[in-house]
Image (spheres, rainbow, N blue to C red):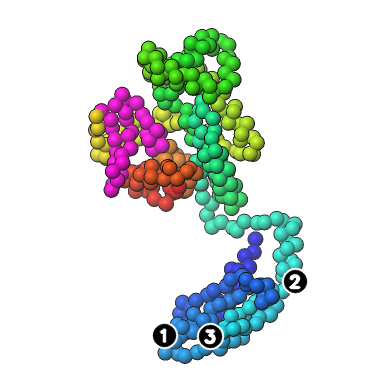
Amino acid sequence: MLNINQCLQQIFGEAISTAYPGLENAPLTVTLNQQAKFGDYQCNSAMPMAQMMKAKGQKVSPREIAEKIVQNIPNNELIERTEIAGPGFINVHLKRMFVSKLLSNLLVNGVQPPSLKKKKKVVVDFSSPNIAKEMHVGHLRSTIIGDSMCRLFEFLGNEVLRLNHVGDWGTQFGMLIAHLQDKFPNYLSVSPPIGDLQAFYKASKKRFDEDEEFKKRAYQCVVKLQSKEPDFIKAWNLICDVSRNEFQKVYNCLDIRIEERGESYYQDMMTVVVKEFEEKGLVQLDEGRKIVFAPGQSIPLTIVKSDGGYTYDTSDLAAIKNRLFDEKADIIIYVTDSGQVTFLFILRIICIDVDDQITKCFQC
């Protein structure tokens, strides 16, 4: 779509260059007129030009400069007439025929995005609820803002990857699977009627906190899940599917398109990520944990727990590596609340410390 302001800047830029060819870097200011009775646009270059010329020993009034600019405006299809007001404001009235053609084109073809010099690959990480838990207002806010950003990038012609980094892995699945085995022992052959997954989660968490035997069994379930034993993978899928169905109801209501790539998606990549940090000498040991400090920061990321398991930090690092080097993202955007700003800042610094290619392609 034609940008009127840019066209007028080009016209007045040519007029200024013709009127004052010896004046380098002449200020060029074209804005919408705040009051319609004075015209559609306004060029306010005369005043700062007068100051520039005064500094060079040339005393010329802004109004005189404005008159000379107007005299040198080239022939064009936009401007009907100009008026000089006050100390040197140039009010611009657009041609009715030009505006009419512009509006007709808008009605027929709709709003057209500006042409891109280079299409970019944009990854937007948004929504990201946790499996077995309800979506709260923070997730809804992230979902709506993230989808809006995706639509804008897509409208402009960029390639957009909409990612839902759901919390679908970790210790909590051990207690959920153990609770599932007790409540629905035939879950492998008969789909369990888990109507309220939130209540199911609370019941399993209560047992986990109060029953030591159940807690031990939950940890064993985690180990078997991470080892990808078929029965435990099926139990995990059953639980995830219940949540997915509930999330999808919300997404359908809001007309959200999003691709799920939860923490589980990056499990096989985490070993490589940890190895890279170790090879670069960035890993420190802390009471059995493997941690990484960002330069100048006092808060570390834990990439391996004392029991040898990976963490949310590890999955986030693996996700960044995948998005940058496998997906070839030019920009990564995380749509989250302000509580995550410090974490994302540290994450970015650490990533740049590992690979200096990671610069402008990481935004929050």
Residue placed at 41% from the left, 86% from the top? 56
Q: Secondary structure at mark 3?
A: helix
**Percent position (x, y) of residue 33?**
62, 72
**Would you name the residue on which mark 1 appears?**
55
**Percent position (x, y) of residue 181?**
48, 12
Is residue 16 placed above or below 160 in the rendered structure? below
Q: Is residue 23 left or right of residue 11?
A: left
* Pointer 3 or 2: first along the chain: 3
Residue placed at 53% from the left, 85% from the top? 62
Residue 43 location, quadrant:
bottom right
**Would you name the residue on which mark 2 appears?**
97
Is residue 190 placed above or below 272 in the rendered structure? above
Three-letter code, disc 3: Pro
Q: Which residues are magenta?
A: 288-317
Residue placed at 62% from the left, 71% from the top? 34
The N terminus, quarter of image = bottom right
Residue placed at 41% from the left, 45% from the top? 341
